[in-house]
């Protein structure tokens, strides 16, 4: 019986292959994208235990995972790394992950639902961090961030084994352990990708694949060319003059625009200290043009401001035709007479006696 092959893609199925898993009856071998063994997990069915071994020294145990009817206990042998316990809850429909042992704080909660498993962060009232979706073809598990319709972070494709094998809580815990990414794993993968981008997959390591390899020009006073071939010994080199090694491509005079050559401008490679003040200002004086007067100058000032002086007389409103007496007569006529309050019916002696009590 051949081992099953599980392939992990970054993002969707069309993404880059970042890991391979060789899954068999004896254990799981985890390989990176270059098929180099990174992790090794061995099964011990007699003791319901799975151990993580050092790939270079298989007798060295790095972690131990013990399964029991209540869940799984992780034993770590790294200094400063806290163990975790995975406990079944709600009749096996949930798995609570506690940091630091059976009585530690609940860090994660995995809930088995119709089409997959949801992972809730930081307790039962937290938000869904990611979900593991079992695809309809029973040949892949897609991990999505943020919810059931979130972005696909990775897709794990199964060959020689069905994805539904890991639907049971104990099998899902096994799958969760050998497919998890540690912080060091992610950092190592990022560094490898950065090294490929900087060095290029082809060519010299550490050299950009977009580097300019053509001939470079230098100023006329150096008399040399840059590149791998230093060229013949020039008078500038013989005299001890240090050539320009800045790596900047100087444009020869023939590349200058024709309009600039016909104006008698100095060559582009001349130093600014060699250009006199008269020569600098000659170009501005030759090309200066007189400004033409605008059409508004033909309009006399009187005509311009005549419209502003012709102000219209404001008309009086119709309200000024109503006498003041008529305006306020209705207000005086509609004013109601104030009624006496009920407190006026209480005799003064009764009021004083009530206050003495």
Image: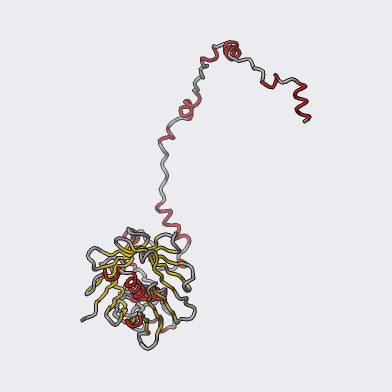
**Quarter residue 57 falls in:** bottom left
Coloring basis for residues: secondary structure
Furthest residue in direction left, as rendered:
1
Report whether residue 231 is seen.
Answer: no
Of residue 341 and residue 92, the one placed in the foreground of this image is 92
Q: Position of residue 160 (x, y in %)?
A: 22, 75
Q: Is residue 152 above or below residue 309?
A: below
Question: In this view of the protein, which residue sits in the foreground, 240 or 133?
Answer: 133
Question: Can you say whether 307 is above or below 176 in the image?
Answer: above
Q: Residue at x 20, y 81 (%)?
A: 1
Viewer-side residue, 258 vs 10 = 10
Of residue 4 and residue 282, the one placed in the foreground of this image is 4
Q: Residue at x 41, y 41 (%)?
A: 292
- Residue 167 falls in which quadrant of the image? bottom left
Residue 76, percent across and down? 44, 79
Q: Residue at x 37, y 76 (%)?
A: 67
In this view, 96 is above or below 347: below
Q: Position of residue 290 (x, y in %)?
A: 42, 45
Q: Is residue 188 visible?
A: yes
Q: Quadrant of residue 186?
A: bottom left
**On the rendered image, what quadrant is the C terminus found in?**
top right
């Amino acid at each position: 019986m051949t081992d099953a092959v599980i392939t992990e893609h970054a993002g969707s199925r069309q993404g880059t292959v970042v890991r391979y898993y060789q899954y068999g009856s004896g254990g799981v071998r985890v390989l990176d994208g270059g098929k180099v063994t990174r992790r090794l997990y061995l099964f011990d069915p007699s003791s319901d235990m799975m151990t993580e071994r050092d790939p270079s020294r298989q007798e060295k145990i790095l972690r131990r995972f013990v399964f029991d009817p209540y869940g799984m206990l992780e034993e770590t042998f790294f200094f400063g790394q806290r163990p975790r316990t995975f406990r079944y809850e709600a009749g096996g429909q949930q798995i609570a992950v506690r940091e630091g042992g059976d009585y530690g704080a609940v860090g994660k909660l995995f809930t088995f639902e119709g089409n997959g498993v949801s992972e809730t962060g930081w307790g039962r009232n937290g938000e869904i961090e990611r979900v593991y979706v079992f695809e309809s073809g029973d040949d892949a598990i897609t991990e999505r961030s943020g919810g059931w319709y979130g972005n696909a972070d990775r897709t794990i494709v199964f060959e020689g084994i069905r994805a539904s094998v890991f639907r049971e809580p104990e099998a899902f815990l096994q799958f969760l352990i050998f497919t998890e990414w540690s912080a060091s794993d992610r950092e190592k993968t990022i560094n490898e990708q950065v090294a490929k981008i900087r060095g290029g997959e082809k060519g010299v390591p550490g050299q950009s694949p977009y580097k300019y390899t053509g001939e470079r020009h230098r100023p006329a006073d150096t008399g040399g060319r840059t590149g791998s071939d230093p060229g013949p010994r020039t008078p500038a080199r013989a005299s001890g003059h240090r050539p320009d090694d800045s790596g900047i491509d100087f444009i020869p005079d023939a590349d200058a625009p024709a309009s600039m050559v016909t104006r008698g401008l100095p060559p582009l490679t001349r130093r600014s200290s060699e250009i006199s003040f008269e020569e600098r200002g000659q170009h501005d004086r030759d090309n200066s043009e007189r400004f033409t007067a605008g059409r508004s100058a033909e309009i006399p000032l009187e005509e311009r401001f005549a419209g502003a002086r012709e102000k219209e007389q404001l008309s009086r409103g119709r309200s000024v035709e109503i006498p003041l007496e008529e305006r306020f007569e209705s207000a005086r006529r509609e004013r109601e007479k104030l009624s006496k309050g009920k407190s006026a019916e209480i005799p003064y002696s009764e009021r004083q006696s009530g206050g003495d009590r």
